[in-house]
Image (cartoon, helix red, strand yellow):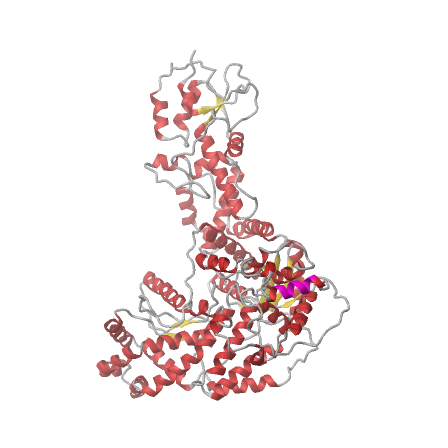
Amino acid sequence: MPPSPLWRYFYTNGTLYKTDKSHKNAWCKSCITTSVCYLRERDAGRVRAGEIAGVRSQAELEKAAVERVEPISGKPERMRVHLKNCASVPADVRTVALLSNSSSGAGATNPQRIPSTNSRLLPSSPALHIPTPSVARTLGDISVKRSKSWNEATSSGGIKSLAKSLSPSELQEEFSGDLCKLFISMNTAWSAANNPRFRSFVQKWVGPEVVVQDRRVISGRVLDREVQKVEDAVKTKVKGQLATGVCDGWKNIAKSSLVSSLMSVGNEPYLIQTHDVTGDPKTGDHLLKLVLEDIHLIETKYDVKIIAWCTDDGPDGKKIITEDVNRALDVVKWFNNHGTALELLRQEQLLTFAYAWALILPVITRWTAHYLALTRFLKLKRPLQLCWTRNETKLVVCAGTKEELQEKAREIHATVKDEAFWYRIDRIQKILEPLAIAANVSQASHTRLDHVLLTLGNLVRIYSENTEFDEDMRTGIIKSLEKRWKKADQDIFIVAVFLNPFIRSDLFKRTALRESELYIIVERVYERLMRCKATIPFLSAFEDYKRRQGEFSDEAMSLNMMKQKFADEGAPLDVQLIWARVDSGVLEGRNGLVKLAIHIFTVVANSAGCERIFSSFGITHSKLRNKIDAKRVHKMTAVGMQMKREDRDLGLSRQRRKRKFGDEDGDDISLSTSSTGTEDGTEPGPTNFSDYAAGLIQQAVISDAPDALGDTSPSIPTSSSSTSLPNEPPRQTRVPAKTQIALAALFDFTIKPEDGLEFYWPGSKKNLEDDLLAHERALADELENESVPSRSATTTEAAPSA
């Protein structure tokens, strides 16, 4: 008897069904296809998490799917019933099953199948040939196709299909894990899990196969399981690599003092530990103890080598802005606090530019914040003056009925029309621009040691050569820079610039740093970092590298090609990767110079990663959720960071807009929003600025005094001075005197800046304004969603560039 036509929708390996002596095992091809889709998605997720190397082959997936799907009897009537009821079967196949003649193929037990007489599975053979379904759930590398009907849309996805592929416990575990990550991603309170409306929604639209567990379970056991998955993925990804440790302190909304540590591997930060130090002494000794504990944890748990540790340099932002800046900020606050005045200014901008920009009020006293504020203020000079000229009476009246309020309005008017005031503001903005660009360079997540020294040198060049700036102010800035550089570990910064293959020793003055002295510095850093003695081949490599010969020539290192590659990708130049391409794997000899460069360019020279983590902490530990303990916030942030990395790798997340310095272009939206809080969660008040030049000079005077703690107390390396950490007790060696070369004496300022000192400058100079526009658009979206006009000042802050 010919086989039933229904066998085209089933697969068999020739084995008999249980105790049935006549009928074979039959696996529904639609069920197998659904299971293959699920397994492929799960493999793709594990690949993104770093748990496995790659997705299994189609043959392996089909074999695993057959093992997961329960077979049925090969009786035609049983197969017909399955096709009618199976949620994975497409609608057209279900129709065939309903219309098929029950007598056709009845009793058939010899369908076309894999030409094998034994029970061994051969899922890769043409007989099985499980096609990719026309409608597939789309994760990983599964193609996206639009469904044509509800049955087709649900035929290969949804809870019903998952229920066929997973056991009830596996299904519940996966649902709870995904729900936990969803809550973290959306910053949703854990109490939502106990909300009866949410539970009824899940039961109605998801089904009874899963339940929403209690909030304590999701934020406890389930969260711990997700954190363990993240840690396992990080272990697989970073194992055996070089890392930089970073730590910083923060105070949350509950006034708890926290110290968090992370490791940076390949310019990617990974959150490691958060310590609650509320009741602990805030001393260098205690911080050193925490750092050593975290180093041991990182190296033992993740099998990486910590080569440097970086901490913050303490409070930033000096109150050194002149009275003119205070007057400018008074104008900003006055307009933002009077709705009528703000609307009149907006209309004037539309007449002038056809666009409307926001007035920026910096709350945090940082270089970039004030640069942004003054840049925007100068751009709105003409609209501000025209607004007062055309609407003086309205603006005075809108201030209020009291005489002192109207007098304040007249003071604002006098400030706006004072041309000398605008001239001085323009000069201050030009003074702040190099400092803002330098902050942009030094606060990036990929900032290296050569970034820091080149930035310091370029600042000295700018303030030395630009005679338009006030002499006392220039002297104060240069003294402050030289003071910082004097305290730094100069050797490793000089070597970092030298080992930048695009620069080498071209920028150094030969009178201040002869070739023999440069080699001594390189040798000293090599022996400190690599724990081995420099040899004659190392000296030979140094000489060839300095002269761009042999394997260190520009052509052999493919410098132009690599620079173009990163430019095309829009990525920061990765000097470590350039050196890794010429690494032979040997620690000593000529390759010792390569190993030294790879170690140095692995170091991240700031704590910007910690600052970004604290921003995430602040979003999670808000005023409404102030009872969440620090450990749970740490776990939530770790899971959230992993999800962001996965979304970025899949191209699902929108890239952060970069900052851009200089003229403002592009359209914008007039907006204003409430001021942000400070790091400890308190609302900031108006800043009381001191005199600009006097502040710098006073800072330089203080810097000449000896340190209060002296050099005897243990301390952690400061930001911009990441110091190598030994992995073993150092052997007794000759310790040469500390390198002391002033910035003004170290660099040859006669070389064109674009050929050296400004190597990283243009990239940061073009980044700022785009960041400002993105910041304002985000705030505009918030206001649009809230549909509530706000009249308070827009706040900006010098956030690190990503």
Q: Position of residue 288 (x, y in %)?
A: 66, 68
Based on the picture, tell me whether residue 539 belongs to the magenta stretch: yes
**Residue sitting at x 35%, y 40%:** 146
Locate residue 258 relative to residue 135 in the image: left or right: right
> Looking at the image, which is closer to me, 503 or 793?
503
**Residue sitting at x 34%, y 37%:** 150
Residue farthest right in this picture: 732
In the image, which residues are magenta? 537-544
Q: Position of residue 238 (x, y in %)?
A: 59, 53
Locate residue 61 relative to residue 546 in the image: left or right: left
Q: Quadrant of residue 577?
A: bottom right
Whether residue 59 is visible, yes or no, is yes
Q: Position of residue 416 (x, y in %)?
A: 31, 84
Name the quarter where the N terminus is drawn: top left
Residue 50 to residue 189: above or below: above
Marks counted in the figure total 0
> Looking at the image, which is closer to me, 471 or 680?
471
Q: Position of residue 208 (x, y in %)?
A: 44, 39
Q: Quadrant of residue 250?
A: bottom right
> Looking at the image, which is closer to me, 492 or 515?
515
Based on the picture, tell me whether residue 510 belongs to the magenta stretch: no
Residue 751 to residue 49: above or below: below
Whether residue 362 is visible, yes or no, is no
Q: Main secondary structure of the magenta part?
A: helix
> Looking at the image, which is closer to me, 743 or 257?
743
Residue 12 to residue 636: above or below: above
